[in-house]
Structures are given as C-alpha cells and as structure tokens.
Amino acid sequence: NYHRFVIDTAGRGSVGGKVPLGLKRKGLRIVVTGGAGFVGSHLVDRLIARGDSVIVVDNFFTGRKENVMHHFGNPNFELIRHDVVEPILLEVDQIYHLACPASPVHYKFNPVKTIKTNVVGTLNMLGLAKRVGARFLLTSTSEVYGDPLQHPQVETYWGNVNPIGVRSCYDEGKRTAETLTMDYHRGAQVEVRIARIFNTYGPRMCIDDGRVVSNFVAQALRKEPLTVYGDGKQTRSFQYVSDLVEGLMRLMEGEHIGPFNLGNPGEFTMLELANVVQETIDPNAKIEFRPNTEDDPHKRKPDITRAKELLGWEPKISLRQGLPLMVSDFQKRIFDDQSDATT
Ligand code: NAD
Ligand code: UDP
Ligand code: UDP
C-alpha cells in the first residue's frame, strides 16, 4: 500500500493501509477520463480547487486542450493524450470515467468506435480500478431509458431502447458499461458509482457539436435561424453544468452505488427552448423547421427523488439563469476568436 495516499481529511473516501510518515499527503489522486471535454473540464476545475491531484486522460476526439490549459504548469495537474480503448497503468484513488462523445452527431460519426469506447474503454478503466483499489464512477446517460414509456423516468425503469438503431452505439454502449460496472462490483469488489446524466449545457460546449442548446445559442448569436427538428414538441430537461459537477462529486464521495439520475426536472419542448433562447439573445431570431433524426426520444425528464434523498442533491440553476452564463462564453469564442468558431 506504499504507493497509495492516506486520506486524512474527514469525510473523504478513504483508502486504508498503514503508510509511513512522510508519505502522508492531503488530497486524492484522481483520473478524469474525458477530462478535456465539456463536463470533464468543469469537474477538473473543482477537483483542482479542492486540492486534489488530477490526471486527465483524453484522446481529444471532442475535447480540447483549451478547456484545461489554465492548469498547465500546476504540479497537481497532468494531461495525457491517450485513447481509453488501449490499456493504461496509473496509480490513483478515484476514477471519474467520462471518456465518450456525448453529442448524437459525434457519437454517430464512427459508431463502432463509440461502442469500443463504451465497452473496451470502460472495461480498461474497471480493470485499472480493480488493480489499484480505486473507486470508479461511470457517467452513464438518460439515453439508457431510450424512448421512454414511463414519464418522468425513475432509476428502476429498464427503458425502451432500439438495439439496432442509429443511436444504439451510444445507448446500448452505455447500458453495457453499466453492466460491466456492476459485474466488477459484484465479482471483483470494485467500489463503483453510476450516474445517469440528463441533457447538460454550459460554457465550453463545442460550438458546432449539433446538440440543441449549443446549436440554438450559436445560431441566435450568428443571426441564423434556430433549427427546430420535427414538430418541436418533443421535450428535454436541461441541467446547468455546475449542478451536474456537484452531483457527480457528491455521488463519488457518498456511500451509495446508484444508479442516480442527475438532471434538472424543468422540462421544455424544443419550441419552448427556442423561445427562451429568443428571449435571452435575440427576440427577432427566426425559427426554421427541419426533419427530425431517427429514433429521437419523444420526451425526457428525470425523477430525482433518489438523488435528493440519498445524496442531498438537487439542481439550483434554472434554464433562464444558466443560459446567459453560456451565452457570454459562446459570444467570446464566436466573435473574439474566429479561428475557434470553426473548430
Ligand atoms: P464531450 O464530448 O465534451 O467530452 C467527452 C470527452 O471524452 C472529450 O474530451 C473526448 O475527447 C473524450 N473521449 C472520447 N472518446 C475517447 C476515447 N476513446 N479515449 C479518450 N478520450 C475520449 O462530452 P460531455 O458532454 O462532456 O460528456 C461527458 C460524459 O458525460 C460522456 O461520457 C457522456 O456520455 C456523459 N453524458 C453527458 C451528457 C450531456 O448532456 N453533456 C448527458 C448524458 C451523459
Ligand atoms: N487494465 C488496464 N490498466 C490496469 C489494469 C487493467 O488498462 O491497470 C485493462 C487490462 O488490460 C484489461 C482490462 O483492463 O484489458 C480488464 O482487466 P482485468 O484485470 O479485469 O481483466 P483481465 O486482464 O484479467 O482480462
Ligand atoms: N434538436 C433540434 N434542433 C437542433 C438540434 C437538436 O430541434 O438543432 C432536437 C433533437 O431532435 C432532439 C432534441 O433537440 O429532439 C435534443 O437533441 P440533442 O442532440 O441536444 O440531445 P439528445 O437529447 O437527443 O441526446
């Protein structure tokens, strides 16, 4: 156990063992896979601020160095360009496993790669967790509920997923990742946590990643029409990124495996979302209807009773409060740095 930190801060997850004086350190060693991405980079900011040592493992498929560059030079921060589909040896206390493209446009781009990332990538990170005795947190998704027949979605619902559709590489990939996570827990006693994340938005989202909030915000700022897919009556529930990061950290530090829904129960149709974007950015922004994508879930809204009761967590930032925080980031990236706007 000499290679592990002793946790001497009350309330933190602990890895036991007698460690010689001199090796006693505050703070945890934490891997964040996908840490150069949208959610991951915000999580890294919080962990670094808390005094932990963070290793980001990312292949930069959808992530960007710019998201974590402000930590370069900090001895508590390390960035490794690595694809989680390949094995890796690290010595750590906790693993936040986020590596996986999240936007439908990105995850459909190379579906087989998406499956490999979810299955082989998750297997490797669980193998790592088993070898070093680290606690492992999987960022799963509300997509495991598919096109849900129960509304709102409770964690006990098993979902309605098309196994052979264009979204399956992601939906079924994450479902298998959940299965692997539970099998490593049952079979190898790995300490695990599972979060089912609902649609999240905020600064540092890829500007042109095709997700609805980033699309509408970028379109309104560029004076382009907002592209509503289908009839616009389908719903989503949008969570601001800082609320999610708080939920992920509470889940990791807490005593419960989950799965836990982490999302904001405020539910909007895409037309209502377009209206909020118009109110926030440009009341004259036009709306343009486009054909919807295949297998698009009709509605989605988290039941967060379990997270409220067991993690003491609930989101604090409404869509109308959170959107302006994202708009200022997009404004800067679209207009101040034209080179970035096209990436
Ligand atoms: P993102 O695309 O911004 O970040 C994903 C990161 O993973 C990127 O930095 C990317 O380069 C990296 N990555 C992808 N494949 C990799 C691989 N094979 N090896 C190493 N790194 C790899 O997406 P995000 O919104 O930050 O999502 C983070 C996690 O949260 C994902 O696992 C996603 O499935 C989950 N999630 C997000 C949302 C959401 O609304 N943002 C909703 C549900 C679930
Ligand atoms: N693995 C890894 N890093 C480690 C330990 C394991 O990447 O520190 C990978 C390993 O290469 C394997 C996977 O995780 O592909 C599962 O490992 P495990 O030991 O559970 O299974 P096994 O190697 O026995 O198949
Ligand atoms: N959508 C839309 N206009 C866009 C992008 C997406 O109306 O420019 C719709 C999409 O059809 C879906 C919803 O917005 O019904 C959410 O899509 P997104 O890709 O953001 O995430 P999902 O929840 O589908 O993973």
Image: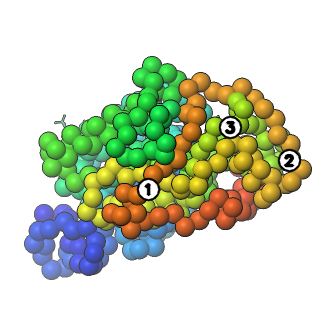
Instruction: Specify which label sits upstream in the sequence, 2 or 1.
Output: 2
Say whether mark 3 is within 8 Å of ligand 3: no
Q: Quadrant of the C terminus?
A: top right
- In the displayed structure, does residue 321 sit left or right of residue 220? left
Asked if residue 196 can be seen in this view, the reply is yes
Q: Measuring from the top left, give residue 110's x and y in whole percent.
A: 51, 27
Quote the CA–CA distance across marks 3 and 1: 23 Å
> Which residue is nearer to you in this view: 37 or 108?
108
Q: Residue at x 45, y 24 (%)?
A: 162
Horizontal side of 183 relative to 291 (left or right) equals left
Q: Position of residue 138 (x, y in %)?
A: 35, 48
* SS label for mark 3: loop
x 36%, y 36%: residue? 158
Q: Earlier in the sequence, mark 2 or mark 3?
A: 3
| Residue at which label 2 appears | 285
Quarter of the N terminus within the rendering: bottom left
Residue 42, compared with residue 150, is above or below; it is: below
The foreground one among 251 and 112 is 251
Tag in front: 2 or 1: 1
- Please name the amino acid that badge 3 sits on: Lys
Q: Which quadrant of the figure has residue 326? A: bottom right
Up the image or down, 25 lies above or below 79; here it is: below
Examine the rendering and report whether any part of residue 209 can be seen.
no
The answer to whether marks 3 and 1 mark residues whose Cβ atoms lie closer than 8 Å is no
Which residue was labeled with disc 3? 233
Q: Are marks 2 and 1 in contact (CB under 8 Å)?
A: no
